[in-house]
Amino acid sequence: MTFAETFSLKEHKDLVNSALAEFSTRECDYLRGIGSELNDVATAMHSFICDSGKRLRPLFAYVGYLGTGAHPDEVALQAASSLELIHVCALMHDDVMDGSDSRRGAPSIHKAFEAIHKSNNSLGSAEQFGISSAILLGDLALIWSAKMLHQSGLPSDALLRSLPMYDEMRVELMAGQYLDVYESTLSSQSVERSLKVARYKSGKYTIERPLQFGAAMGSAHPEKLMKAYSDYGLPLGEAFQLRDDVLGVFGNPSETGKPAGDDLREGKRTVLLATTLDRVSPAQQAIINEHVGNANLSADGVEEVRNIMVTTDSLAELEDLIERLTQAALSALDNEVIAKVARTSLAELVSIATRRNT
């Protein structure tokens, strides 16, 4: 039976989970060895890393590797798994910047360490301790990502080829995070600027760059494949982030792990909000101005904003855009530069990235 007939995204997600758990266990044991003061750090890091998630970045990276025609390889899977730790860094820092109290149905890292401070009756500000801890844990995750990659056993030539994409992925993520913070300081909002934030904050580092990272691991001359992966990854990455925009307002808390309408409370300058503001009446504008960015926004207030997004057809417009981007990604797979087994998996990943509830 050939590999193409037996390849399973679920099985490889399980392998990614195992690789991350093994790495995290080893690194957390090292932290505990430094001193008992780091027990809470080790526990929080291991729990956050092993609390699954979609593992999209490692999966795209590994499928990108297979797209070169390379054979399945445990070392390549280890290297691809390291990308998840960049995502862990982004999530921890993002929750601090957004003031999010929860993540995946549990307290966010800064809130968890704020609670630890309070339970220990420690000196100083519990809030500041929580924020400082989350920044440091996020930084540690970023360091661990590089460590996991460098210790993966990847041959030196493949490692050197992949490092430019690895570096670019991290730079673009941080640039996108800053664009998101900067956007919140502006007095106006535009769909074009919000799309740019979506592209860099999430889209490129979730799909395009991991695919290209995998291509660099698997081939000494991946130039044509790099373009094919951009043609697929850029529209899908934007569709992925736009689906996040929808879930941030309309998602079910039991599935998203976040309170209903949390993006509205945080005042996130999403494409959905920008589209809505382009279509509202003065009365609707006043309602949005009152509710968006209000940390104490009630469920009734969330529903009012949702109704405006629906009645102005802003939600429908965004769903249409997601569908167009999704179809563009699928069309890009009609390219024999990408090995067949990868094209099959990439088509499956389109659905996972855009037709999801979390």
Image (cartoon, rainbow, N blue to C red):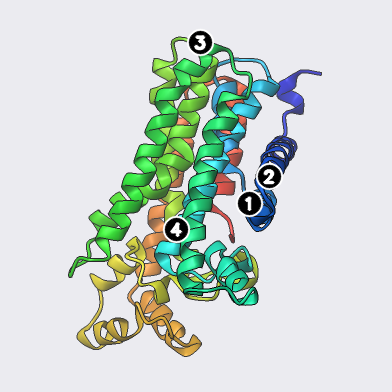
Q: Which residue is mark 2?
A: 28
Quadrant assignment for the N terminus:
top right
- Label 2 sits on a secondary structure element that is helix
User: Closest to the observer: 160 or 217?
Assistant: 160
| CA distance for labels 2 and 3 | 30 Å
Q: Hey, what amino acid is under mark 4?
A: Asp
**Residue 112 appears in which quarter of the rendering?**
bottom right
| CA distance for labels 4 and 3 | 34 Å
Which residue is found at the position 63% from the left and 51% from the top?
45
Q: Which residue is mark 4?
A: 94
Neighbour tally class for label 1: few under 14, some 14-19, many 20 plus, Cα within 10 Å:
many
Task: Please tell me which of labels 1 and 2 falls first in the chain.
Answer: 2
**Residue 223 appears in which quarter of the rendering?**
top left
Q: In the image, which disc is placed on residue 45?
A: 1
User: Horizontally, is 320 left or right of 5 in the view?
Assistant: left
Q: Which residue is mark 3?
A: 157
Task: Please tell me which of labels 2 and 3 falls first in the chain.
Answer: 2
The nearer-to-camera label among 4 and 2 is 2
- Position of residue 249 relative to residue 217, above or below, is below
Q: Hey, what amino acid is under mark 3?
A: Asp
Task: Please tell me which of labels 1 and 4 falls first in the chain.
Answer: 1
Position in image of residue 18 (x %, y %) = 74, 38
Q: Hey, what amino acid is under mark 2?
A: Cys
- Position of residue 273 relative to residue 235, above or below, is below
